[in-house]
Amino acid sequence: MPATPTTAEQAGDAACPTGVQWTLRRGGDELTVTEVGGGLRVWTRGGIDVVAGFAADAQVIAGRGQQLIPWPNRIEDGRYAFDGADLLLALTEPALHNASHGLVRWVPWRLTEHTDDSLTVALRLHPQPGWSWVVDLETSYALTDTGLVVTTTATNRSTTRAPFGYGAHPYLSLADTSLDGVTLTVPGSTYLEVDPDRLLPVGTHPVEGTAYDFRAGRVIGGTALDTAYTDLVRDGDGRWEVAIEGVPHGRLALWGDATYPWLQVFTGRATSATEGTNGLAVEPMTCPPGAFRSGDDLLVLEPGERHTGTWGIAVG
C-alpha cells in the first residue's frame, strides 16, 4: 500500500524538513515516521503524546526519534582503527571535536512496505570519508495491542568485514509532569562514567551506592542523567525494560531484546519547554559510546552477514 504524503506536500507547499511523512494508525494510536533519517517523529494514543516528538514543519530536535547507525553516541576525534586501516570521520559534534550518532540521521530512507499499522523503511549505506563499507539497512515499525515494536536489520554487502553498532533515540513523553513526580526504573547494574568536558568514556562502575542506581525504581527529582548502563537485568527471554511512572499514560516502558547489552538514559530535554513536549530519552544500544575505538561489544559483520535487533515501547 503506498504511503500517503502530508497535506502540505499534496498541496505543493513547502516540503517538510524531514521529508515525506508516513503515518500508522491502530485503535487510538497514531504514529508518524519520517523519510529523512527513517525516524519516529510523533506517536499519540487517544490524542496524548506517548513520545516527545516535534512538529512536521520543524527540523529534528535533540535527536528525537532518530536512528543511530552505524554507531551510537560519540567517537573521540572521529578517529578509529579497524583491520589495519586508520580511519577519520567527519566531526559532526564540532564543539566537542567528536563524530556523533552515526551516518544515517540526515539522509532520506525509502518506503518498502506500508499497511495501516506497520511499515518498513530501507537505506543502503555507502562508503564515505571514514566509512569503507556497503551495508543494507531495514527498519520496521509496527503498532500492536501493547504498543510499538521496532525491528532493524543490517546486512553487510561488502567483500570485507565491517564494524557496526546500532542505537535509537526516542523520548518517552512526560508532558507537563515534573521530574519530582516521575518514578524511573533502570535495570542496569553498571554505569559508564564520562568526562565532563567532551562526554567521552572514562570507565565503568557498579551503580550500587551511587546516584545512578535506579534498579529498585525511585523518583528522578534533581538527578541529571546522560548515562549509559550495562549488565542489564533481563527476563527469561533476554528482554530488559526501562519504565517511567507518574506520566499522563500512567506508565511507559521501553524494552530491548537480547541483542542490546547497553542502554542510555538522558534527562537533558526533560524540562525543556521551549523545545516541544518534555521527554526522557531512553536509548537501546548494541554497544557503548566509543566502541569503534575500544572494541567493547562492537559488532563485526562478515561479508553477507545479517544482524537483527528488536526494541519497543509498551503503554500502560
Image (cartoon, rainbow, N blue to C red):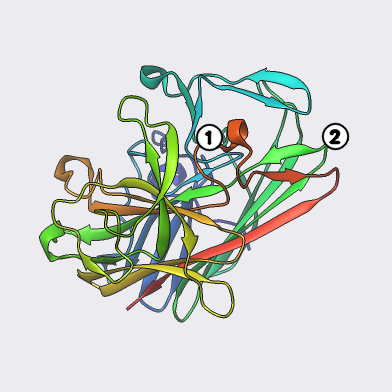
Inspect the image, locate mark 1, and give the three-letter code of the amino acid beneath it: Gly
The reply to whether discs 1 and 2 touch (Cβ–Cβ < 8 Å) is no
Q: Position of residue 278 (x, y in %)?
A: 22, 52
- Say which quarter of the image contains residue 107: top right
102 vs 276, left or right, is right
Helix, strand or loop at mark 1: loop
Quarter placement of the N terminus = bottom right
Q: Position of residue 279 (x, y in %)?
A: 26, 53
Inspect the image, locate mark 2, and give the three-letter code of the amino acid beneath it: Thr
Quarter placement of the C terminus = bottom left
Q: Residue at x 59, y 68 (%)?
A: 115
Q: Residue at x 53, y 34 (%)?
A: 290
Is there any visible trace of residue 149 in the rendered image? yes
Residue annotated with mark 2: 160
Task: Give me the C-alpha separation between circle 1 and circle 2.
Answer: 22 Å
Q: Residues within 10 Å of mark 2 (few under 14, many from 20)?
A: some
199 vs 307, left or right, is left
Q: Earlier in the sequence, mark 1 or mark 2?
A: 2
Which mark is in front, 1 or 2? 1
Which mark, residue 290? 1
Helix, strand or loop at mark 2: loop
Q: Position of residue 30 (x, y in %)?
A: 39, 66
- Which residue ends up furthest to the right in the rendered image? 159
Q: Is residue 283 above or below residue 58?
A: below
Q: Is residue 128 above or below residue 124?
A: above
Q: Is residue 179 above or below residue 204?
A: below
**Which of these two is toward me, 252 or 98?**
98
Q: Position of residue 2 (x, y in %)?
A: 61, 58
**Which of these two is toward me, 76 or 243?**
76
Which mark, residue 29? none
Is there any visible trace of residue 131 in the rendered image? no
